[in-house]
Image (cartoon, rainbow, N blue to C red):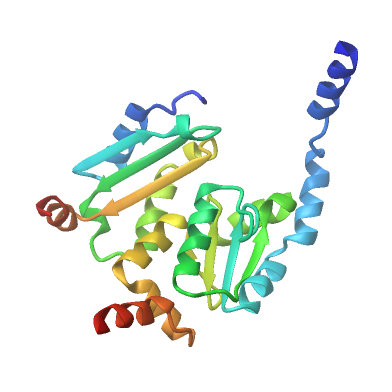
Amino acid sequence: MSTSLRLLSRALRARPVPQPCRRLLSQDSSSRERLDALVKKDKVVVFMKGTPAQPLCGFSNAVVQILRMHGVEDYATYNVLEDQDLRQGIKNYSNWPTIPQVYLNGEFVGGCDILLQMHQNGDLVEELKKLGMRSALLDADKGQEKK
Amino acid sequence: MAAGLSVDFLREKLKRELEAEHVEVEDTSANRCAASFKVLIVSPKFEGKPLLQRHRLVNSCLAEELKEIHAFEQKTLTPEQWAKENQN
C-alpha cells in the first residue's frame, strides 16, 4: 500500500508537461486567432470553471446566476478546467489574471466582480440591449409595478 | 501561502502605488482552497475611468502577487463614490 502510494505521488509530481512542449501546445490550441474567433462567435461568451449546470467555483457560479437572472439562457461557455492551454491562453488574450471571464459581442467586459457591479448599477441591462437582448429583469420590474 | 502575500503587504503596496486614500484588504483564504483576498480601494486615480480600467490598474499593480493568488475580489471607488457609500 505505502509503496504504491509512493509510486502514485511520484507519478503525480512527474506529471507536468516539459516547458518547451507546453509552449508548442498552447500555440496550437489557444492561439490568438483561435481565441479571437471563439469570443466573437457568440454574443455572450463565458470562460468559466465547470459548466452552467455544474459550476466548479463560486465566482463562475455567480456569473451563471447573474446571467440567469437577466434571462440570458443562450450563451457559449468554455470550461477552462478541461483545457489547461485555454485556461492560460484566455488570460493572456484578455490580459486578465482570473477566471471567469465574460465577453459581450466579442469584447471582454470583466470577471465576476465587474459583472456583479454591472448588474447592480443597471449597466448590464443596457449592454444586453445593445446586443438585441431584453433583460428578464425589465419584465420582472414591470410585473411588480402593476401589482 | 506564498511569502509576501500578507494583508499588510498588499494594503501598503496598493496604498502607495495607487495613491489610495483608503484600502481594506481581507484575507478570504479560509473560505477557499488557496490564497484569496478581497480588497476595497478608494483612489482619486479611478476618476473618469470605467470599471474595467480601474480593475486593470489594480491588476497591473499586483501583477506579480496575482500569480500566487488564487482568488481576488476587488471593489474600486473614487473618493466621491466612497463618501456617497458611507452616507447610506
Left or right of A123: which side holds A56? right
Residue A114 in percent (x, y) is at 40, 60
Residue A96 showing in the rendered view: no
Q: Residue at x 44, y 79 (%)?
A: A128
Q: Residue at x 30, y 64 (%)?
A: B49
Which residue in the rendered view is the most extreme toward the front? A147
* Res B38 → quadrant: top left
Left or right of A135: which side holds B82? left
Which residue in the rendered view is the most extreme toward the top? A2
Q: Quadrant of the N terminus of chain A?
A: top right
Residue A22 in percent (x, y) is at 79, 46
Q: Residue at x 39, y 55 (%)?
A: B55
Q: Quadrant of the C terminus of chain A?
A: bottom left
Residue A28 in percent (x, y) is at 80, 60
Q: Residue at x 49, y 61 (%)?
A: A65
Residue B82 in percent (x, y) is at 18, 52
